[in-house]
Image: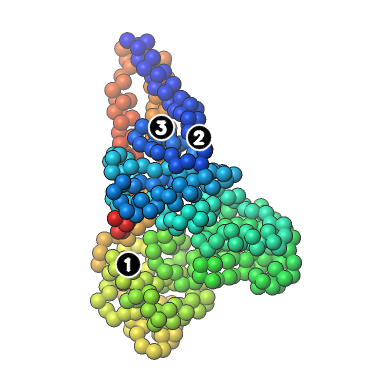
Amino acid sequence: MRMKRVFVVYSVLLLLVQFWLGEAETFSVDGKVLVLDESNFDSAIASFDHILVDFYAPWCGHCKRLSPELDAAAPVLATLKEPIIIAKVDADKHTRLAKKYDVDAYPTILLFNHGVPTEYRGPRKADLLVRYLKKFSASDVSILDSDSAVNMFVEEAGTFFPIYIGFGLNSSVLEKFGIKYKKNAWFSVAKDFSEDLMVLHDFDKIPALVSLNPQYNERNTFYGPFEEDFLEDFVRQNLIPLAVPVSYETLKLMKADGRKIVLTIVEDEGEETTRELIKLLKAAASANRDLIFGYVGVKQMEEFAENFDIDTKLPKMVIWDKSDDYLSVVDSETIEGEDQGTQITKFLEGYREGRTIKKTFSGPSLMRFIHRSFDIRMVYIIVFVVAVLMLIQTFSKGGDEYQSVPNQVRTDHAISSVFEAENNEYKPGDKED
């Protein structure tokens, strides 16, 4: 019996080693969209550092329109220095996989970076999708050796992410931030550049770190001190535009930022009056960089906005620390009327002076907007470690003392706990179809 148990444990270890060393080699990077199901999904995720998975349904019209775009993008992404693989799962057929990843509408697209899934909310046209995804396989810090290299870098980066360019800086200064904020921004250093480029990017001395946010037409320059804490403050503050439109993606950025949020709730973000208000919010944000200034339209995100008592007159302002509570400023809750600039100043002065009232959300916690981080390979690591412990116990104790059931129970409990945590992920708002 003891030898039989040793054989079983050895077989488990062998299968796990084959999984890591053998199965991963069966997938080829040939530019085609991989077709995944329950039998090969986990091994595909473990085989590639970056893999975009489309959970689709054959009857879904949006899925049918997306499919040729993925087919066109796949060969381009496969040629990158760090290839990005595109795969698809028929979620209508493989319901266990769909349920595991909370697929409740089609198409649902998940980007797995080193096994960690996040929902992809970027563009879906092939050329834009390629430009967006290149960020995840690019160098942590790109080295630019001429004006044309800088211009090309900015052009190819596109408008999806902020861009940081260090002029007269060593790449090692930005290396840590290039790694830490890889999912959120482009980082580079320019080694050789002209005065014309300095004029173009509006800085007059070096060293300098310039941040560009093409999507919001914003530029800021940092002249030092180039110590880690000061640098990170500048990088983190410029990941977010001066006035942030609230969305699922920007909520994650704001959640990661330690600053409190001055949140303005309006009826509709698209109205002309709102656009004028946003200009005032940007001016206030420039003078109050210790705060984030965000805005949200009831028309755009009613589920989010209604947590802040939108029965009062809009627009209104509150201070939110990203918990289930927020602050209203006495006599400054609404900012309707003509002189909104003065009202914003009065609101900020009231907050600074502590003339606030604490209120609680009228709806459920907003932490459901923040996605999980879970590495599927952790399951295999848990099984591997437990199997090794079982093998050690087999050789260190007598045959009659060996108890396999408790170890198996612990293994099952550990795995089930991981999947239970995985299944508690927030399900995003309405998706297509």
Looking at the image, residue 31 sits to the left or right of residue 426; the answer is: right
Apparent side of residue 177 relative to residue 315 in the rendered image (left or right): right
Kindly report which numbered mark, 2 or 1, lies closer to the viewer in this rendering: 2
Asked if the residue at tag 1 contacts the one at tag 2, i.e. Cβ–Cβ closer than 8 Å, the answer is no
Q: In the rendered view, would you say 28 is above or below 240?
A: above
Name above or below for residue 205 compared with residue 382.
below
Q: Earlier along the polypeptide chain: callout 3 or callout 2?
A: 2
Label 1, residues with CA under 10 Å away: few <14, some 14-19, many ≥20: some
Tell me the residue at 49%/46% (across/down): 74
Name the residue tied to disc 1: 301
Q: Determine whether 326 is above or below 176 in the image.
A: below
- Name the amino acid, label 1: Met
Q: Earlier in the sequence, mark 1 or mark 3?
A: 1
Tell me the quadrant of the picture where the C terminus can be found: bottom left
Question: Toward the viewer: 340 or 274?
Answer: 274
Find residue 245 and report its horizontal and vertical position in percent: 42, 69
Q: Residue at x 54, y 47 (%)?
A: 76
- Residue 40 position in % (x across, y down): 39, 33
Q: CA distance from mark 3 to mark 2?
A: 23 Å
Whether residue 330 is visible: no
- The residue labelled by disc 3 is 380
Residue at 46% in and 66% down: 259
**For the residue marked with disc 2, what is the amino acid?**
Ser
Q: Identify the secondary structure beneath mark 2.
A: loop
Does residue 9 lie above or below 380 as drawn? Answer: above
Colour option used? rainbow
Q: At x 49% / y 57%, what residue is drawn?
A: 128
Secondary structure at badge 1 equals loop
Mark 1 to mark 3: distance in Å? 39 Å
Q: What amino acid is at disc 3?
A: Tyr
Location of residue 377 by image quarter: top left
Crowd tier of the residue under label 2, counting other residues whose Cα lies within 10 Å: few below 14, some 14–19, many 20 or above: few
